[in-house]
Image (cartoon, rainbow, N blue to C red):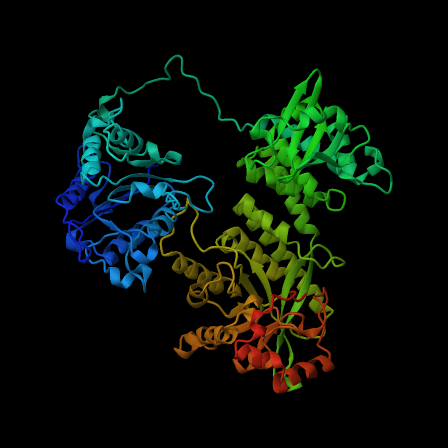
Amino acid sequence: MAGRRSAVIIGVDDSALDAGLPSLRNAEKDALSVRDVLCDPEIGTFDPADVALHLGPDATVDAVKASLSRAVRESDVDDVLLVYFAGHTMAPEWSHDTDVYLVTSDLDDRALSQNPDAGLRMAYLKRDVLGKCRGTALLILDCCRAGSLLATPGQRIDLISHEGRPEARYSALMASTHDRPGALSRHVLAGLRGQAMDRRGQVTFQAMSNYVLEQDLDPAPGVVTKSWGGTTVLTRPGDDHSESDRPALTSMPDGVILERLENPLDRYADDILALIDRISRFAAEPQASGVSPDGGERVEYLRAAMGADSVALLEYTATGVVTIDGTSRFDRERLQHFLRPPEDEFIPSNPVWFGHTVQYDGLTLFCAPITRALFLVVVDPRPELAAIGQPLAKVLETVWRSDFAAHPLEAETLVLTALRQTCGRLPTALYERCFQLYQEILRTLSIVFQPIVTIGATWHQVGVHSYEALARRSLADQSAPGAMLQVAHTWGDRFVIERDKIITEKALLAYARAHTDGPWDVPKPVSVNVSVRSLLSDSYIATLRAAIAAANLEPSAVTLEISEGDPIEPRSDEQWPDEPHAHFHNRLAAIARDVGVAFAVDDFGSGYASTSRMAELPLTQIKVDRAVLHHRTALQELDFIVSVARDAHDRGETHAPRVVIVEGVDAESPVTLRQIHENKIRHVQGYITGQPAAATLRQMALETRKEIADRVSGDVDPRAIELARGGPAGDRASLRKGA
C-alpha cells in the first residue's frame, strides 16, 4: 500500500541579513509554482493538506524547522518526503565555508557564532531531516553553494550518506547558477509539467533530474539518487486513463506464467543443515575427524565435516601468505598461485572482498574471509558445498569464531543467526531449526537470584529488600549468556517473546522453590527482565499469569523490569492509536490492573531508558545503571532521579514514591554508600554483600549488615571528597560489575 506523501516548500526573495545579498525576483514565485504543480488535481501526486508552504516573511527558522520536524516525526517506511528550497545561502566567516546556512527571512548571522543552530543549517538537513526520515526523502535546492556540497575541494562534506543504514534512502538535485538565479527551478517545473514524462505518462525524480541535466546549466547541477528514491513518481501529466476504462479480465489469459518467489537459499537449506550437523558431531568426537585425543583443532573437524582434502587458516602479510594452522595434507607451496589472485577485488584487504572459489584442472579451492587479514582455504570440499557460495563463507566465518566443542547448541544458533543477518529471510527449514535450538538453549539455562539491599545508618535497618532473577549458563558457570539473550532481536518478535516466556516461567518457579527452602515466612518481592515487545503480547501475559499461579506467588510481589535495550515504538506494519509512550502507558496500566504485577525501568541512564520513560510510565521502581555512578555529575544525577521518583507522590497521584535502586554498587564504586543514602536512596544492588548471586535465598550475615551500616553512617572515604570537587574519582574507568 502506498504511503503518505508530504512536502516542505520554501521560497525567500529577501532576508534580514545585512550582508549585501541581492533581492531575488522569483524564488517565492517558483516555490509557489512547485507547490501548485505537485498538488495539481489533474497531474499532481501530493495532497495539499500534507504540503507546508513557507514564503517570504513566513519562512522563518522556527516555522520551517517545525514543519520539517513534524514531517520526519510522522514519517513511516512507505512514505515520501520532498523538501524544496529556493533562495540564498550564506557561510559565516567563522565556519571557513564548512557550515552553510539556507537564508530564511529572519536569519541573524550575528547570533550564529553563539548558537549555530539559530539558523537552518545544511548539516541540520542532513542529520535531522534526511538522516531521520524513515521513508524516502527527496531534496531540491535552487541556491548558491548547493551543488558544491557534494564535493567541496579540501573539505569532506557529505550530504547524502547516513550512519546506521545499509543503503541510503534519499535523493538530491542541487544547483548553484550564480548568473541565472532560478534557472534550476524553471527546468524542474518544465519537467514536472510533462517535459520529463516517461512512456507511462509519469515524471519520476530520476527522469526530472535527467531532464534538468540535459539543459546545460553552468555549473552542472549535482544529482544523487540512492535506493528507490529516483523511481518515485512526482507527477502524472500523461496519465489520462482511469482504471474503469480498462477491460476487466474474466479468466486467466493464455501465456501468463506464475512462479512462487523462491529464496535463493531454499535449494541449499538441507546441505547447510547437514554440514552444521557434521561440524557439531566431529567437534564433539575429535577422533572421528582425525584429531588426536588431546587435539580438537577447528581445521581438523572442518575438513572432516566438509569432506575436504585439507583445510588451512592463512594470513595475508606484507611479505606474502602465511599459514597459521592447517591439516596435514595442506600444501601451501603447491597452491600459492591460487591464494592471491591479481584482481584487486579479490584481495582481502579490500573491504568488499567476500571470498572466492578457484577451479583448475580438477582442483577446487574455497576461500572464505575470517577477518580483514585472515581467511580459510578449503581444498576440494564436497561439490554441493562449494556451490553454496557466499552463505557458506559466512557459515565458515562464524564456525571459526564459535566453540562447537564446548557449546554446540549455542554455536549452531550463532551460525544460523549470522546467516539471517547476512541474507535476510531464511528458508523455513533454517528458521524453524534455529527456533527449536533457541528453545532448547533457554530451557537449559539456570536461574540465580541477586539481592537488592536496603541500606541504613544502623545495622537493624540493613537487610534484603527483594531479589532480581538472573539467567546463567549453569550454576557452575556464573557468566551471563548475553550473546544468546540478544540473538532473539535478530530474529524478531517470535524469538523475543518466546525467550521472555521461558525465562519468566523458569525464574518464578525457581524462586518459589528457593523460597520454600529459604529463611522467610513470606516471599520477598522478585523482579524479572522483560522486553517491550513481550509486554505488548497477549501470549506472554497469559504465560506470566500462569507462572505466577503455578509458583503460588502474590502478583504484587512480582516486578517486571522493562529492558533498556528496547525502543517504545510500533513496528513498521503496526499502527498505535496513541503517541507511543501514551499507548505503552495504557498497556502497562491494563496489565497491572488485570494481572496485579508492578513495573520498573531497568538500567536508567543507558540505552532507551530515558527520562521520558522514567517519568511517563506507571512504575513502582527505577533502577539506575551502574554507569551513572562513574559520571562526574553522579550526585546531581541521583538527586534528579529521586526528584522524578517522588513527583507523582508529591502531587498526590500515588500512595508512595517510586523506589530508586542503584545497580552495580560494590566496595570500589566512586560514589559512596553515605552519599547514596544522603540522596534519600535506600536501596542498592551489586556485589555489596560480598557473595555472588545464587540459586538459594539467604539472610545477610550480621557482620555484613554492620559493615554496610558503618559505611552509611561514618564513611569518610576520600573518594567522596574527590567526587564532590570534580576530582579524579569522577574520571575513574568503569569497574567490574557485581555478580
- Residue 731 at what x, y percent from top left? 57, 69
- Say which quarter of the image contains residue 104: bottom left
Relative to 401, say whether 500 is above or below. below
Residue 475, located in which quarter of the rendered image? bottom right
Question: Can the viewer see residue 555?
Answer: no
Decide if residue 520 is on the left or right side of residue 609: right
Q: Which is more toward the observer, 247 or 160?
A: 160
- 376 or 596, nearer to the observer: 376
Q: Residue at x 63, y 33 (%)?
A: 393
Q: Can residue 353 be seen in this view?
A: yes
Q: Is residue 160 left or right of residue 627?
A: left
Left or right, 70 with respect to 658, comes to: left
At x 40%, y 13%, the residue is 255
Instruction: Please indicate whether residue 423 sits to the left or right of residue 568 in the image.
Output: right
In the rendered image, the quadrant that contains the N terminus is top left
Tag count: 0
Residue 609 lies, in percent from the top left, at 49, 62
Q: Nearer the viewer, residue 464 or 112?
A: 112
Query: Farthest residue toward the left?
Result: 25
Q: Where is residue 194 in the image (x, y as percent from the top left)?
A: 20, 28
- Residue 701: x, y in percent? 73, 79
User: Looking at the image, which residue is at 59% across and 82% down?
Assistant: 674
State the residue lying farthest toward the top.
Answer: 254
User: 349 above or below 238?
Assistant: below
Q: Which of 35 and 516 is in front in this view?
A: 35
The quadrant holding residue 177 is top left
Q: Quadrant of the C terminus?
A: bottom right
